[in-house]
Amino acid sequence: MEHTADPHVPFSLLPSPHLTSQPPLSITMPSSKRQRVSEDDPLTLAIAPPTTESHAEREERLAAEQEAKRVSDAIDDELNKQRISEKKGPKAIKILLLGQSESGKSTTLKNFQLMNSPKAFRSERASWRAVIQLNVVQSIHAILDLMSKAHSSAHPSTSLPNPSSLPLKEYPPLNPEHLKLKMRLAPLLQVEVALIKKLIPNGHAQLSKLANPAQSLPIQQEISVNSSVGWKNTFSRLMGRNSCDSADLIDWSDPDDPGVVLNACAEDMKRLWTDPIIRKLMDIEKMRPEEMAGFFLDALDRVTSPRYVPTDDDVLRARLKTLGVSEHRFTMKTGSMGSPMSHDWRVFDVGGQRSLRAAWVPYFDDMNAIIFLAPISCFDQVLQEDPSVNRLADSFLLWKAIVSNPLLKKTELILFLNKCDILRAKLASGIRMADYIVSYGSRPNDFESASQYLKKKFAGLLKEHSPERLYYFHLTSVTDTKSTTYILENVQDVLVRDNLRRSALVT
């Protein structure tokens, strides 16, 4: 009998003419070798019971293992039921929040939580109390850094080896009282380190190196946490409680509470913030902390009080940069549609930094709507990750990329021109949009003219790259709870109606 080799079958799998009639070869490992392999296996050794285990301890261990298996099986059953329910029930409505870093995505997500899960939102106040404390301390730290810079500039002999290579600025001189004030506020830096150590996984505070040997303070870097590390539980442990629905739920006698130091330094912090020379320093550096998220220096009396509990507005204003994807699920309340048939809702918040935008694409599939947030008050700012790019110009490019993406041609687009309150104040203070956006031309430097120009700019990009496509437009200040709630309720009603229309339930 002749065998022809099949070119598609590996040589080792071809039958041999001398072995076709023989039974398959069976190899049995000796029991002693099996035992030796088992004994050498690290996992087997790790989970093996102790050799000195007594009968009572063995019974206790077996009972614990049985209980753990019961809990695991119950969780598996619940997950299976949830999968079956999701398949049988109405399809979830999914919303993706997009925009550059600090555009207001996380604040919008908090608004959704406050609207639809108020009890869960307020149960996290202790966690946000700690974040607000960190925001306060870091705002003061930034001002102290500026004071160090001004002091070094006034004393060239203690400056960098080659000061002539650095751009010189005329800073107002600091007096001895300023230096004493700086020393009295030094304990806040220890509070900052303690909060950061609790926040960063593995408890290690990552502080940058000194920018100049004469400085006593490190250059500040914004702290980022991954959305999957459970930072809220970490802060709850720091505060000694996992709920802060009322003042009675906080351990006010905890000597390690950062609020003790903040309260002791409150008067000095207010003195620093209102000092005219310090204000002039900030003007020279174009440092405007009141325009940034996490600004509480105008409420120091309240947020440093001994029994401070954050309000809803405080939580919305608190700033904590997150990496990764945050997902919030809720069942929408009955809205103006007048029907309780609202579906499961899922809102996704993805990172807006340039390095994280590649992670947006996997979420483009099967989304009902995208809420794109463009912070229009930042026309005079640049990207932190690329100082050569204007932030408003970056929002234009992002919007263009979104509307021209073929994966999103059937996705509802909702545009939030955000931070209108800051834009209004900035224009009223005399900062001219035309100095930063050339195409603004000679239009009046007021909010109405600027907002209309920006609306037409975004609408023009949509018409150019996705003609005949509808979109929804809102001027927003997402830290304004009342107006944002009204806007989000309208958004929810629009998406419910669209979802029903796709299901042929509404014509």
Image: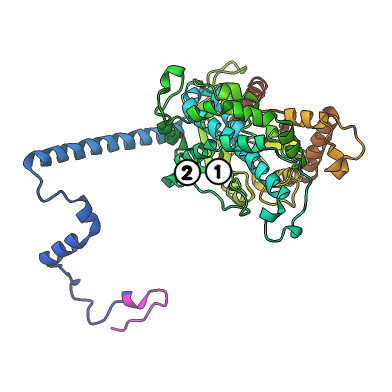
Question: Observer-nearest residue: 220 or 462?
Answer: 220
Looking at the image, the residue that sits furthest to the right is: 442
Query: Is 8 in the magenta?
Result: yes
Q: Position of residue 308 (x, y in %)?
A: 52, 21
Residue interval drawn in magenta:
1-12
Q: Residue at image x 42%, y 46%?
A: 202
Give the side of residue 412 with respect to residue 445, left or right: left
Mark 1: few, some, or many residues within 10 Å (few <14, many ≥20)?
some
Which residue lies under the disc numbered 1? 223
Q: Which label was assigned to residue 486?
A: none
- Above or below: residue 310 compared with residue 160: above
Q: Are marks 1 and 2 in contact (CB under 8 Å)?
A: yes
- Above or below: residue 23 compared with residue 277: below
**Badge 1 amino acid:** Ile
- Above or below: residue 74 compared with residue 335: below
Which residue lies under the disc numbered 2? 200
Magenta span: predominant SS is: loop
Q: Position of residue 121 (x, y in %)?
A: 50, 25
Question: Observer-nearest residue: 485 or 332?
Answer: 485
Please tell me in which quadrant of the rendered image residue 483 appears: top right
Mark 1 or mark 2: name the one nearer the start of the chain. 2
Question: Observer-nearest residue: 28 or 221?
Answer: 221
